[in-house]
Amino acid sequence: MLSFLLSICVFSSSRVSMEAKKGAGGRKAGGPKKKPVSRSVKAGLQFPVGRLGRYLKKGRYAQRVGTGAPVYLAAVLEYLAAEVLELAGNAARDNKKNRIIPRHVLLAVLELAGNAARDNKKNRIIPRHVLLAVRNDEELGKLLAGVTIAHGGVLPNINPVLLPKKAAAKEAAKVTKSPKKA
């Protein structure tokens, strides 16, 4: 079996020497060089995959950084930016403006947290309001499901089984009352 594999290797190597020599990148020697394609273009993203990969390596977040990590990070950041810009565009349209200015971005980002603060009759947005806004929003809640927001607390949640029954409570209240005198 080993001799068979060796004969195949020898045959294939002699065959390569008969053909035209190949240059870098699998092209024939002297052939036209292909234009380089960025990883952002390959992934269909606008955010710079190469730059994010460089930042991940330079930041020493881990000893090694996989090839898919910067692509995934770029996709997530691009999605978040698109969501924020969509909300900012809505804020600009509400203010009857054609351009998005930083104020509109601020309004968009703080819209959900601001709503939570307003619901609690507060003027200042605190981490608790950010947590309530994120957890009550379907898309953001799914995206940040494994994230812990510092000083955010938890969503109020009581299992319905643990709550007292309303019908039994009303009947007990009626029985304990003294009858009215006529």
Image: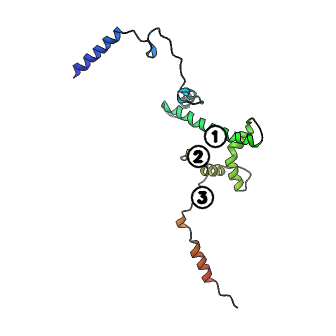
Residue bearing the label numbered 3: 156
Residue bearing the label numbered 1: 83
Say whether residue 161 is visible.
yes
For the point 22% across and 19% down, the residue is 3
Q: Is residue 40 left or right of residue 113?
A: left
Nearer the observer, disc 1 or disc 3?
1
Quarter containing the C terminus: bottom right
Quarter containing the N terminus: top left
Horizontal and vertical percent for residue 23?
44, 12
For the point 59% across and 49% down, the residue is 138
Residue 22 vs residue 77, the one in the foreground:
22
Q: Contact, CB < 8 Å: mark 1 with mark 2?
A: yes
Disc 3 residue crowd, few under 14, some 14–19, many 20+, Cα 10 Å: few
For the point 55% across and 24% down, the residue is 38
* Spatial CA span between label 1 and label 3: 27 Å
Disc 1 residue crowd, few under 14, some 14–19, many 20+, Cα 10 Å: some
- Provide the secondary structure element on which disc 3 rests: loop
Horizontal and vertical percent for residue 126?
68, 50
What amino acid is labelled 2 in the image?
Answer: Glu
Q: Which mark is residue 139?
A: 2
Question: Who comes first in sequence, dot 1 or dot 3?
Answer: 1
What amino acid is labelled 1 in the image?
Answer: Glu
Say whether residue 65 is visible.
no
